[in-house]
């Protein structure tokens, strides 16, 4: 975000809401989901009145703090099939590839310098416990000719990753990009289309009235026929959604490598651990490294407490050099911790908020929201305008099945025990040490997964 905002010094600002307004659709949240939805609505119905309310600056949530790996949903094909069946699950996977193409075309059409790098994505094994983590996915994908996966051996995986790897699966359809430059570009396009955007306008109330719903802020309000909550991890303030979400955090660091130490990574990489290591080359020669699942939030306050500096940057750098030895002695340029809402299915879900007719939500991206947010925008725009076709009628537009997670304090205390066991197991597996039975059993309680 700091880098993206440098280019906006002389551009007009999106002022805070300071009055009462009316709109056909009010969108709460100015990130990828909110802005894509606003653009989708104006593309479908140019005359529609759309107002976006953003608590801070557009993109300052997950959209501007993620790793910038634009992926599709093919790695989650088994979860897609379980949720929607063989045919519909594959259709959603295909739509997620089309979303990548859409983003690339959109950036070209509108002059958004999102630093798109079409360098693919590698799903790699870092240690023996991760070998073959993709077998179920490859077996499920084998029934579809358009599966993008290419299995690679240890030599090729190591070359692509710029780090020791025991093998992996490569997907050439994925890209790396600058997420904050993309979201700020979406803001510019949305405003050009006539979308009214108010930054520094956090929602303080949501009131259902006879003629619609009123969204209140500390200094104003918007009454709208439809309201869209595009607030991702902050959806945990609603109990019916919180039951299906685990709010955790990812730690990220951007470094400038010493190139004399080894070959740089050539692609975007995720390992196959439960607490993912991920890294990618950035435009200009820097490298981003991240570690997932390192924080856990308490109740509705959890999201805000996980949006902060990395508590132990030294541990993050140690993990980085363990996974990617060529990054040893790199210069640290920046680091941050950002909240991630993991759904219990690992899949995003969308729908109408119970008790609030005409209020719709999108959440559960589970750390992979850049591309799927385009699909989410199509669903939410359809719901807000009562257009029941395409993705609006898919299984993604239904609440996840199951009873969900327990309430606090059981949820938080139990989660901390499981997280501690997972971190201990992660370290032992990286060192190829034996994991004791108690640690293995406790770590298995974790309800989240990259695969669902």
Image (tube, rainbow, N blue to C red):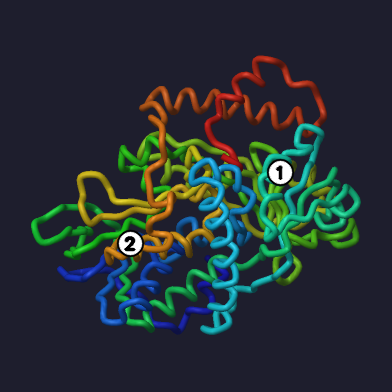
Residue 21, by quadrant, is bottom left
Position of residue 411 in the picture relative to residue 170 (left or right): left
Residue that numbered label 2 is attached to: 388
Residue 339 image offset from top left, x and y in percent: 49, 47
Q: Residue furthest left?
A: 210
Is 440 on the left or on the right of 31, as rendered?
right
Instruction: Decide which of tag 2 and tag 1 comes sooner along the chain.
Output: 1
All told, the count of numbered labels is 2
- Residue at 31% of width from left, 68% of height from top? 52
Q: Residue 429: percent from the left, percent from the top? A: 76, 30
Q: Residue at x 60, y 25 (%)?
A: 444
Can residue 220 be seen here? The reply is no
Q: Nearer the viewer, residue 162 or 383?
A: 383
For residue 62, say whether it is visible: yes
Marks 2 and 1, how far apart at CA: 33 Å
Front-most of 383 and 320? 383
Location of the C terminus by quadrant is top right
Q: Nearer the viewer, residue 112 or 356?
A: 356
Q: Rate crowding at label 1 as few (under 14), some (14 to 19) or many (20 or more) other CA atoms within 10 Å.
A: few
Q: Is residue 67 left or right of residue 318?
A: left
Above or below, comparing residue 21 to residue 154 in the picture: below
Q: Residue at x 69, y 70 (%)?
A: 117
Disc 2 element: loop
Tell me if mark 2 has few (under 14), some (14-19) or many (20+) residues whose alpha carbon lies within 10 angstroms of its own: few
Which percent across, then down, holds residue 272?
A: 71, 41
Q: Which residue is mark 1?
A: 139
Of residues 398 and 127, the one drawn nearer to the viewer in this rendering: 398
């Amino acid at each position: 975000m700091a880098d993206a905002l440098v280019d906006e010094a002389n551009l007009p600002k999106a002022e805070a809401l300071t009055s009462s307004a009316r709109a056909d659709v009010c969108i709460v949240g100015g990130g990828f989901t909110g802005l894509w939805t606003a653009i989708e609505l104006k593309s479908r119905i140019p005359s529609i009145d759309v107002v976006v309310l953003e608590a801070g600056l557009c993109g300052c949530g997950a959209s501007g703090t993620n790793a910038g790996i634009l992926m599709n949903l093919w790695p989650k094909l088994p979860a897609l099939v379980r949720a929607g069946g063989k045919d519909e699950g594959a259709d959603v996977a295909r739509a997620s590839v089309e979303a990548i193409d859409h983003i690339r075309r959109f950036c070209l059409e509108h002059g958004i310098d999102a630093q798109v790098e079409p360098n693919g994505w590698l799903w790699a094994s870092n240690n023996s416990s991760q070998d073959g983590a993709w077998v179920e996915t490859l077996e499920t994908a084998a029934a579809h000719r358009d599966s993008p996966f290419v299995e690679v051996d240890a030599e090729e995986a190591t070359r692509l990753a710029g780090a020791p790897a025991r093998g992996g699966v490569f997907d050439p359809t994925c890209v790396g990009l600058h997420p904050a430059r993309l979201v700020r570009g979406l803001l510019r396009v949305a405003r050009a289309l006539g979308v009214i955007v108010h930054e520094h306008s956090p929602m303080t109330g949501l009131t259902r009235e006879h003629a619609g719903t009123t969204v209140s802020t500390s200094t104003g309000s918007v009454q709208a026929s439809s309201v869209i909550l595009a607030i991702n991890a902050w959806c945990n303030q609603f109990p019916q959604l919180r039951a299906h979400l685990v709010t955790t955090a990812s730690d990220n660091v951007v470094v400038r490598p010493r190139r004399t130490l080894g070959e740089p990574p050539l692609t975007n990489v995720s390992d196959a651990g439960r607490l993912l290591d991920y890294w990618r080359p950035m435009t200009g020669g820097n490298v981003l490294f991240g570690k997932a699942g390192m924080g856990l939030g308490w109740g509705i306050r959890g999201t805000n407490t996980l949006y902060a500096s990395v508590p132990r940057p030294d541990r993050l750098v140690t993990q980085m050099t363990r996974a990617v030895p060529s990054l040893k002695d790199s210069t640290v340029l920046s680091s941050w911790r950002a909240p991630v809402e993991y759904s219990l299915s690992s899949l995003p879900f969308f729908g109408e908020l119970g008790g609030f007719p005409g209020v719709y939500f999108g959440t559960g991206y589970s750390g992979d929201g850049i591309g799927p947010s385009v699909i989410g925008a199509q669903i939410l725009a359809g719901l807000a305008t009562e257009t029941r076709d395409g993705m609006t009628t898919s299984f993604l537009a239904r609440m996840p099945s199951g009873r969900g997670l327990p309430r606090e304090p059981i949820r938080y205390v139990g989660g901390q025990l499981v997280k501690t066991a997972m971190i201990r197991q992660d370290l032992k597996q990286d060192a190829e040490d034996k994991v004791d039975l108690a640690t293995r059993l406790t770590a298995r309680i974790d309800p989240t997964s990259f695969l669902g």
